Amino acid sequence: MSSQGTDSEQPTKFGPPFDDEDADMLVRSSDEVQFCVFKLLMVKASPVFRSLLSSSNVPPPADGHGIVIPAGISLESSNGLPVVCLPETSQVLATFLSIIMCSALPSHPSIPESLEDIIPILAVAERYQAPRVATYIRSLRPGEAQNPFLAFSLAWRYRLKDEAVAAVRSITSLEVFTIESVGEDLQFLSGPCLYELLRCRETAVEIMDASLREFRGGDLLRNWIRRRFQEESPICATDGDSLPQWLKDFFESVEDNVANATQIQYHYYWQSHRQACRDCRGQSQSAVQNLWMALERDIGHCLLKCHDTLTFDNDPHLPTHPKLTVPPVANADIILRSSDSADFRAHMQVLAMASPVFQTMFQISPSHENLPVINVAEDSNTLSSLIQLIYYPFTFSVPATVDGTMTLFAALQKYGMGSEVDGALEVLRQQLCKQFLPVFMDTQACRAYFLAVRFRLKEETSLAARALLADPLTFESCRDNLYVLPTGAALHDHSRYRARCREAAQAALLAGLSSERESAWFESYEREFEGTMGYYPRSRACISVRDCTDRSPFFGDTGLEMPTWLATHFKSMYDQFGERAFPLSTSMGFAITSSCRKALGNHIDGNPSCAYCATTFIKDGDALWNSLTDLVEQAIQEVAICID
């Protein structure tokens, strides 16, 4: 815990106000900045410092309870003064120490304005058991978070419930809350943290909605109205409601999202209405302001219920796949011990041939029943699958769950078992693609993507990301799988990937319908139709085919001219490709073909005498649809997902 001596490099002095010559203690930050402080004030503020400095003639705590010194703290000495080295930065410690030293400093401590800057200081106060520091900061009523997502992440990391709930309230006030709208701020949130945020936000919305309903029908509001209006004066309300019209309008405007209610909005309805209303014109501003404060206080008290449900669980909750039985290994010369203390006997030479990582691990190990023991980080299920794959690669069965498969893939990557060794990884991936991927990706592509990102599996991340294009991927759809996600940035990465795929699909459709090949396709069928049916050229089109001879370009003034109904349909398809909810799935071919057939059927049903479309598109329309499908699917396949 403690050591004596001085550093070869002198730390930087913080300077005023931590430069008092009478200081009898030094505090050093993680970035080597030194503060001159008073020992008495430090030990009075924190029992942690009292316990740490107890060997320096500081009396022990009165209750005699032992104090656990947090990790990362050390005690040194410099020029006869104790030096406490703390793991926090100088920026955080400056505010923390200024509050402790406020009685000895010439000026009041400066507190940051934003919630995300205050949270680390509160965390230090909690870490060193300095409740008076935390109480002082909270009494100043810090302002709103400049970035509520960062604020919630910090509060969740440091387990500060008050600040976490404050951040949740700011987030619930956002009019749009989607993966795209949060964007790069997702990088601040781990998967478990994001899960807790979504759950708390949902709880907060329900609580605030219920609170508004109770407030609207409660005694407080009825008494306020009774005091403000005389019995003989008409009440400006309708439908038998006792509320003034402006207050009713305000409640209706925020009933979909109570968190959006602001004081500015509240006073806007009042000021706009009172100019034309005799009943409300005499209302004093203080009375109206008092009602707003009562409403805000009531909602704030209700939000305290979020404290009871807020958790700080960071466990990814990875389930294990069923344990595989490995046949006994004869003449084993090594034992692999899993993280859950299961022993697996094997041969050094076999393992070394399969993995260069194993080869380097065999040099030093403790003994166990006269056999060397290698401790590995994998659990018994994963290690069992790994050993079976090494010994029996051609009879090996892929685990039946995505968690088991991705965990095994991570182990194969960790131990360097690629094609350059014995092809085990490629064999497994082929089995995955043939047996597992088609069935699994349709239902659990989201979890597969999260696990692939978690284990840094590049190829599997691409496969899962492409399969996930068939899913809209919203916070609600991925919520149950968030605990396995290492960082919310993966959601932002897939959102950008999806946007690039939409752009590629639109560009491919536009290019396909503007190409010489498609133009030749239309011209050849037009000539064939003219020769067989003998109708006049376009300028003299007969009435029966007017809709199809009156051509329209697919896109603006450019692109291929085609029957108007088909140009309208392709334009609609182009717009659909740009919509977020449109599934850019591996079954794009079926979607394009079926939609074109349906559009053709609707056109012919409405124009039964249209011989051109009945002859051309019913006969060989699928050739055009399939050609466009190939272009779109190829364009999507060429888009790569970028994981930051």
Image (cartoon, rainbow, N blue to C red):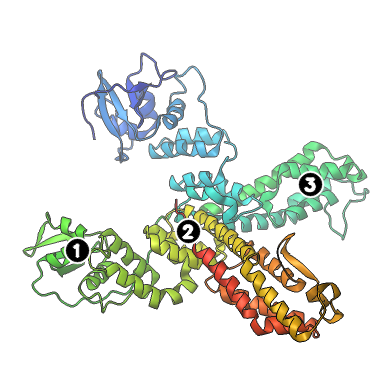
Q: Which mark, residue 337?
A: 1
Residue 506 in the image: x percent, y percent? Answer: 62, 62
- Tell me the crowding category of disc 3: few under 14, some 14 to 19, or many 20 or more residues within 10 angstroms, Cα based: some
Between the C-alphas of marks 3 and 1, the distance is: 72 Å
**Mark 2 or mark 3, which is nearer to you?**
2
Quarter of the picture holding the N terminus: top left
Q: Secondary structure at mark 1?
A: strand
Whether residues under marks 2 and 3 lie with C-beta atoms below 8 angstroms apart, the answer is no
- Tell me the crowding category of disc 2: few under 14, some 14 to 19, or many 20 or more residues within 10 angstroms, Cα based: few
Q: Is residue 447 above or below residue 67?
A: below
Residue on which disc 2 sits: 640
Q: Which mark, residue 588?
A: none
Q: Is residue 345 left or right of residue 435?
A: left
Q: Which mark, residue 224?
A: 3
> What residue sits 60% from the left and 40% below the top?
144
Q: Nearer the viewer, residue 207 or 604?
A: 604
- Tell me the crowding category of disc 1: few under 14, some 14 to 19, or many 20 or more residues within 10 angstroms, Cα based: many
